[in-house]
Image (cartoon, rainbow, N blue to C red):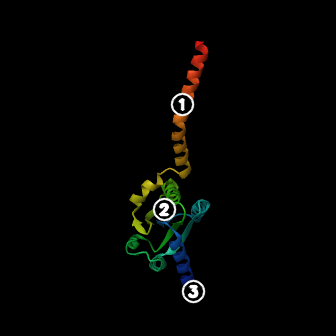
Amino acid sequence: MSLTRIQKETIVKSVTDKLSKSNVLLFTSFAKISVEKLKRLRKDLKAKGVDFQVVKKNLLRVALEKANIDASEAGMKGIPEACGVVFGTDDQISPVRAVFTFAKAKENASFKIIGGMLDHGFVTPDRMAPLAKVSTKEDLYARLLGQLQAPLSKLVYVIKAVGESKTTGQ
């Protein structure tokens, strides 16, 4: 059953709104992936504040044009007739990491990342892969805090050792 003009306009408007709010997009091919696995991916992405929507190629092209994003740059030739689009608004790293993790799983071998957009510029999957390996904000904060605390804790041990040596030396 084909979509009516009103349904298509609604989808284009919805996708255009998401495109204008997003700072990271991922285009995916989900052929031969079960509905249950896609539901699990949607649930994982939703928990991170990321949206996943299946969009027809022509409607996506129209939405990209309406959002003032050059569709020719987006590598539309490599996108299948219907593709999954991941819209990330806050964090650029967590959607990329979640999708790459899902695609790496052995049972999801047919799930492919076709490309993406960062700050309205097209990026190939090869250039997005390193983003998936970047640590989370919390991990980076913890490492920074550890680095800041290390000199202070060493100073405390030195002062304590000097104090103990003076008390035992008397």
In which quadrant of the rendered view does residue 2 lie? bottom right
Considering every residue shown, the one lying at the far bottom of the view is 5
Question: Mark on residue 111?
Answer: 2
Q: Where is residue 143 in the image (x, y as percent from the top left)?
A: 52, 43
Disc 2 secondary structure class = loop
Decide which of 83, 18 is in the foreground and name it: 18
Q: Which residue is drawn at 37% across and 75% down?
A: 72
Q: Which of marks 3 and 2 is in front?
A: 3
Kind of residue indicated by mark 3: Ile
Residue 1 visible in this rendered orientation of the protein: no
Q: Which residue is drawn at 52% across and 36% down?
A: 150
Considering every residue shown, the one lying at the far front of the view is 170
Q: Residue at x 48, y 57 (%)?
A: 100
Distance (Cα) linking label 1 and label 3? 69 Å
Question: Mark on residue 155?
Answer: 1
Q: Nearer the viewer, mark 1 or mark 3?
A: 1
Disc 1 secondary structure class = helix
Judging by the rendered image, the residue that carries numbered circle 3 is 6
Question: Considering only vertical position in the picture, is 48 above or below 60?
Answer: above
In which quadrant of the rendered view does residue 127 lie? bottom left
Q: Nearer the viewer, mark 1 or mark 2?
A: 1
Q: Where is residue 116 in the image (x, y as percent from the top left)?
A: 44, 65
Question: Considering only vertical position in the picture, is 162 above or below 57?
Answer: above
Q: Residue at x 41, y 68 (%)?
A: 121
Kind of residue indicated by mark 1: Leu
Q: Position of residue 3 (x, y in %)?
A: 55, 83
